[in-house]
Amino acid sequence: MIGKSMLFPSAVKLGDLEKGFELMNGMKKCGIRANEFVYNVLIRRLCKERRVVDAQKLFDEMSNRNVAPNRVTYNSLIDEC
């Protein structure tokens, strides 16, 4: 998990959203629950790319999986989208 979590923000911040989702799906397959950090990185990047609908879907998934949004989540949605 540590290796993936370190690669995660780098890949996504460099604009490779697909790699970010691939890493997230790999975590799920291994039984590792994505935390707010993982969701926040993806939501922020989606918003920067003006993919508001996708960001909202990911936010809904976050809530449905009982991962509590935090200040970073809301700021990303407000400031970036």
Image (cartoon, rainbow, N blue to C red):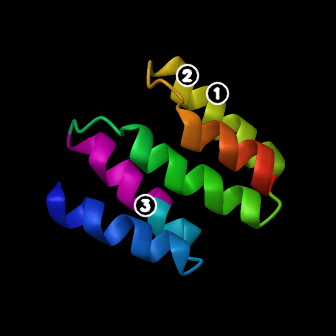
Looking at numbered disc 1 in the image, what kind of residue is underneath it?
Answer: Asp
The magenta span reads 21-30
Q: Nearer the viewer, mark 3 or mark 1?
A: 1
Give the Cα distance between marks 2 and 3. 20 Å
Which residue sits at x=52%, y=32%? 70
76, above or below 74, in the image: below
Question: Cβ–Cβ below 8 Å for labels 1 and 2?
Answer: yes
Tag 2 residue = 63
> Which residue is label 1 attached to?
60
Residue at the (45%, 22%) spot, across then down: 65
Q: Quadrant of the N terminus?
A: bottom left
Residue 66 falls in which quadrant of the image?
Answer: top left
Ranked by sequence position, the earlier of labels 2 and 3 is 3
Q: Amino acid at mark 2?
A: Ser
Q: Is residue 9 magenta?
A: no
Looking at this view, name the residue that lies furthest to the bottom: 14
Q: Which residue is mark 3?
A: 22
Q: Secondary structure at mark 2?
A: helix
User: Within the magenta stretch, is there residue 25?
Assistant: yes
Locate residue 19, reporting x and y percent.
46, 69
